[in-house]
Image: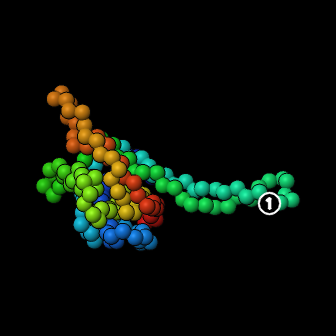
Amino acid sequence: MVQLLRNFRFQITLRQSAEAALGSAPRTVPSTADSGDSLGDGGFQECSGLDLEMDVQSINEGGRNDGVIQRAGRAKYSPIVLKRGMFYGDEGSVNADVWSWLQDAVSGVRPIRRYDGVIEVMSVGQEVAATWVFERGLPSRVSGPTLNAKSGDVAIEELTIAHQGLKLVQE
């Protein structure tokens, strides 16, 4: 039986990275447990940037005229882009900590807080069908909604998070 996945049913959790100071990225997978300080849990209408691209280096070998050797290079990660949503607090109110996160980084508060993220795609029965995790995220852009009294727009129109690693986790 084929499980029906709906790509618009997902949830996002941000937890402070275990290695908060500058340095190399941890090689462990972030979890959904409350291991670090939580920036929040969020609901967004759109999530993009679940991309991984590997640099492939072509090497011309002397005497070999029928092709080139292909070598694996560095990985490049696209930033995670979350659109039309918000992070919410414990009482269901809007959580403004994302704005503070970016404002602290811009105003020179050091060390810059980094957050690991968990993006869970939910199946029809509200079970987790797929989980992506990213490591050591930094806010690179936050934009608020266009304020219009006729619409019910919420706290964040778009949040862009640069990060140092992305994995698809097998449950």
Q: What secondary structure is found at the residue carrying circle 1?
A: loop
Q: 154 or 45: nearer the eye?
A: 154
Query: How are the colours assigned in the image?
Result: rainbow
- Residue 127 coordinates in the image, percent (x, y): 35, 58
- Residue 148 coordinates in the image, percent (x, y): 19, 29
Asked if residue 94 can be seen in this view, the reply is yes
Q: 152 or 20: nearer the eye?
A: 20
Q: Is residue 119 left or right of residue 43?
A: right
Which residue position is annotated with label 1? 61
- Residue 121 coordinates in the image, percent (x, y): 38, 53
Amino acid, disc 1: Glu
Q: Is residue 118 left or right of residue 60?
A: left
Q: Which image quarter holds the C terminus?
A: bottom left
Say if 144 sits above or below 80 in the image. Answer: above
Say if 41 sits above or below 20 in the image. Answer: above
Q: Is residue 71 left or right of residue 105?
A: right
Residue with the most extreme left position: 91
Asked if residue 118 can be seen in this view, the reply is no
Residue with the most extreme front position: 108
The image quarter in which residue 117 lies: bottom left
Q: Residue at x 24, y 33 (%)?
A: 146
Q: Residue at x 28, y 52 (%)?
A: 106
Q: 162 or 104: nearer the eye?
A: 104
Q: Is residue 29 left or right of residue 51?
A: left
Q: Residue at x 84, y 58 (%)?
A: 64
Residue with the most extreme top position: 150
Mark count? 1
Q: Residue at x 43, y 61 (%)?
A: 164
- Residue 46 coordinates in the image, percent (x, y): 36, 43
Mark 1 Cα-neighbour bin, 10 Å: few <14, some 14–19, many ≥20 = few
